[in-house]
Image (cartoon, rainbow, N blue to C red):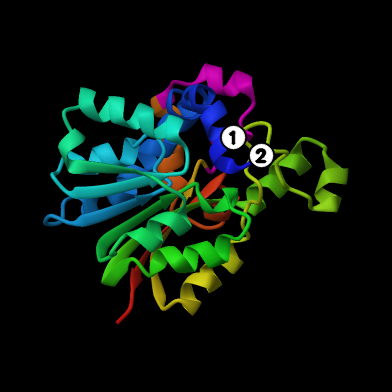
Amino acid sequence: MSASNQFDQLSDHFADKIYNSDKGRLRLQLLQRDLEAIRQKPLMRILDAGGGQGHISRWFAEQHHQIDLFDASQEMLTRAKQLNQEANLDATINLHHATIEQFCQQSAGGYDLLICHAVLEWLEQPQQLLQTLLKKLNTGGTLSLMFYNQHSLVLRNALRGNLRKVKRADWRGDGQGLTPYQPLDPDLLYQWLADEGFKIEERSGIRCFYDYLPIKVRQTYAFDDILELELNHYRQQPYIHMARYIHVIATKAA
């Protein structure tokens, strides 16, 4: 099953598990904390690659930035259009039904900010398609890249006693749920960016602790308490590389 077909079938489930859950709220608030200074810049042309239901795009559109969002899932885009209209932001977010290859072949490029969140881990050829995407960014432009962290899976499975799985180092999802095809090794991803002439300005861990907390602990503390815990550590090592996702902000050198 392709990733686009998978998300068409799981669109509602994805919304409930990701966007309408505490872990989704944590993810969004931490990303917004990282991106707030960029959001306040003068009007930008923004590309939201694999932007799904458009939560980050709408947040930027509130500041009147002009945004192109593409996604391979028509169901995701249908929901994004509905939410954009409800927020009166339909005019500033252009939706495109396309894969990375299709969009990059059809578009002229020249973006000031490229957003690519939780996309690469769903691709069979993440490095090649990342290279294709990065060509759409202007010199001096900013990349906001969030990816599924392989180190987190090792730690989480070890803590759960899944020692055989850790030994096999087989992290690929089965295509039936919301587990990505291939989580990424951070050092490898950083090298890909360096090879393309990008300078990493900032790294942060998105959910350094939440995914390891027992359910009873999550239920004991208020959401704001857990958010505070995350915020106090999410830009510090070693917690960054323990996190479920890693968020990188990088600039494209001349």
**What is the x, y in percent for residue 151?**
65, 53
**What is the x, y in percent for residue 36?**
25, 48
Image quadrant occupied by the C terminus: bottom left
Q: Residue at x 31, y 54 (%)?
A: 47
Does 245 sit above or below residue 162?
below
Residue 157 visible from this viewpoint:
yes
Q: Residue at x 41, y 30 (%)?
A: 25
**What is the x, y in percent for residue 213?**
61, 31
Say if the magenta span includes residue 222: yes
Foreground residue among 5 and 40: 5
Mark 1 or mark 2: whose residue is earlier in sequence: 2
Say if the magenta span includes residue 99: no
Q: Amino acid at mark 2?
A: Met
Residue 228 visible from this viewpoint:
no
Q: Secondary structure under badge 1?
A: helix
Give the Cα distance between marks 1 and 2. 6 Å
Q: Residue at x 82, y 37 (%)?
A: 161
Q: Are marks 1 and 2 in contact (CB under 8 Å)?
A: yes
**What is the x, y in percent for residue 105?**
39, 62
Q: Amino acid at mark 1?
A: Gln
Q: Which mark is residue 6?
A: 1
Is most of the magenta stretch helix, strand or loop? Answer: helix
Q: Residue at x 77, y 43 (%)?
A: 158
Q: Is residue 92 left or right of residue 4?
A: left
Residue 89: name its quadrant. Answer: top left
Does 135 sit above or below residue 232?
below
How would you rate the neighbour count of disc 2 (Cα within 10 Å): few for under 14, some for 14-19, many for 20 or more? few
Q: Is residue 160 left or right of residue 82?
A: right
Q: Which mark is residue 47?
A: none
Q: Secondary structure under badge 2?
A: loop
What segment carries the magenta color? 208-223
Check disc 2 and report the residue beneath it: 1
